[in-house]
Structures are given as structure tokens and as C-alpha cells.
Image (spheres, rainbow, N blue to C red):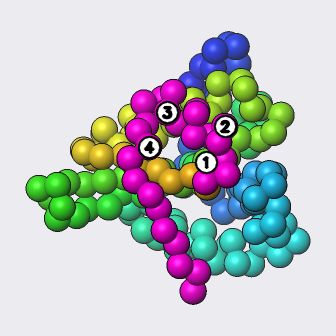
């Protein structure tokens, strides 16, 4: 268990197939997610979970408190040639339940991801955040992340 600042216990653990519905609920629980995610058909998420679970470079976790899923993130480890053969990790899909925002849970999740990256001998931790999420940007900068690049996407 990982203690939160308010003393409540939190368990960060690998996500299971039984957690898919709760994870999708978290993904859909904000203005951007509500436009992208659908909670009425879990089949695409179940297929995606199977791919993630089969890939040893993927670490999809949930934060659980009192038997309730209150947060999630995905950590992807990528070996590479650049930076003298450095291994990188990417933190994606960080979500905290709306009832838990401001509790320290997001900080705990990110600290877990950075520490896990260290254990996996990662040399650079990266993340992206939608340009409209200015509060999230301030949060990441407060944790030591540097706004160093401009990201691009191409929908296929």
C-alpha cells in the first residue's frame, strides 16, 4: 500500500480485465474524454486491453482505495538508439476520479511511474498532454517535467 498525504491507503497495481469498465469510466470523466470515449460498448477496450497485457513493455495500472478504482495510467517502455541507446518511458492516459482530484493521488501516480521507470533502467521519462489542459501542464511542471517539445498527431 502507498500512503496518501491524508493518511488513506492506496494500492497501485497492474490493471486486470475486470478493471476495464472502471478505467473507461475514468477516461470518459472529463470534457475531452467524454467526447472520445464510450462506456456503453466495452468490446474495443477489451481487445485493446488484451494487446496491452500481452506486451511486456506496457504497464497499465490502476490506483485502488477501499476497493474502488480511483486512478489509472499507462507506462510504456521503449528501447531506442537515440541518446546513445537510451531506453525511454512514456506516461499516457493519466486519470484521477473527479472525486479524488486535489487529494495527492495524481502526484502519487506520477511518482510511481517515475520510480518504476528507474527500476526498469529508463533514462528519460516523457509524457504528452492535450494543449488545452493547462492545469495538467502546471501539475506536470510542478513535478519536475519540462515543457521541451511540440507534439504532433495524425489521425488515421
Q: Which of the two discs, 3 and 1, sits closer to the camera?
A: 3
Q: Is residue 96 rendered to the left or right of residue 11?
A: right
Kindly identify the residue that appears in the image at 49 percent across and 33 percent down: 141
Question: Depth check: 74 or 65 in front?
Answer: 74
Instruction: Identify the element where label 4 is drawn.
Output: loop
Looking at marks 3 and 1 on the same chain, the residue that comes earlier in the sequence is marked by 1
Labels 2 and 3: the sequence-earlier one: 2
Secondary structure under the numbered disc 3 in the rendered image? helix
> Dot 1: within a 10 Å radius of its alpha carbon, few (fewer than 14), some, or many (20 or more) residues?
many
Distance from Cα at disc 2 to Cα at disc 4: 13 Å
Name the disc covering residue 141, or none: 3
Q: Could you say which is closer to the camera, residue 108 or residue 156?
A: 156
Tell me where residue 61 appears, x and y as whole percent.
57, 49
Question: Which mark is first along the chain, 2 or 1?
Answer: 1
For residue 147, the mark is 4
Residue 16 is a magenta residue: no
Cβ–Cβ under 8 Å for marks 2 and 4: no
Q: Which residue is mark 2?
A: 135
Question: Which portion, as a residue range, is magenta?
Answer: 131-156
Q: Is 132 one of the magenta-colored residues?
A: yes
Q: Give the main secondary structure, helix, strand or loop, of the magenta stretch.
A: loop
Whichever of callouts 3 and 4 sits on the residue coming sooner in the sequence is 3
Instruction: Looking at the picture, tell me which residue is in the foreground, 61 or 89.
Output: 89
Which of the two marks, 4 or 1, is nearer to us in this view?
Answer: 4
Marks 3 and 4: CB-CB under 8 Å?
yes
Mark 4 or mark 1: whose residue is earlier in sequence: 1
Residue occupied by mark 1: 94
Separation of disc 3 and disc 4 at Cα? 7 Å
Q: Quadrant of residue 155?
A: bottom right
The residue at the point 30 percent across, 39 percent down is 119
Q: What whole-number distance in Å separates the C-alpha atoms at marks 1 and 2?
A: 13 Å
Amino acid at each position: 500500500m502507498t500512503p496518501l498525504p491524508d493518511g488513506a491507503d492506496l494500492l497501485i497495481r497492474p490493471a486486470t480485465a475486470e478493471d476495464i469498465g472502471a478505467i473507461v469510466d475514468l477516461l470518459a470523466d472529463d470534457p475531452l474524454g467524454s467526447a472520445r470515449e464510450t462506456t456503453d460498448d466495452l468490446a474495443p477496450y477489451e481487445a485493446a486491453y488484451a494487446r496491452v497485457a500481452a506486451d511486456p513493455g506496457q504497464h497499465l495500472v490502476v490506483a485502488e482505495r477501499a476497493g474502488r478504482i480511483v486512478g489509472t495510467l499507462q507506462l510504456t517502455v521503449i528501447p531506442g538508439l537515440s541518446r546513445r541507446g537510451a531506453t525511454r518511458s512514456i506516461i499516457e492516459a493519466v486519470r484521477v476520479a473527479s472525486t479524488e482530484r486535489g487529494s495527492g493521488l495524481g502526484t502519487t501516480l506520477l511518482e510511481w511511474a517515475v520510480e518504476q521507470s528507474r527500476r526498469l533502467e529508463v533514462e528519460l521519462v516523457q509524457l504528452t498532454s492535450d494543449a488545452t489542459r493547462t492545469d495538467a501542464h502546471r501539475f506536470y511542471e510542478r513535478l519536475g517535467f519540462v515543457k521541451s517539445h511540440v507534439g504532433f498527431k495524425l489521425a488515421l
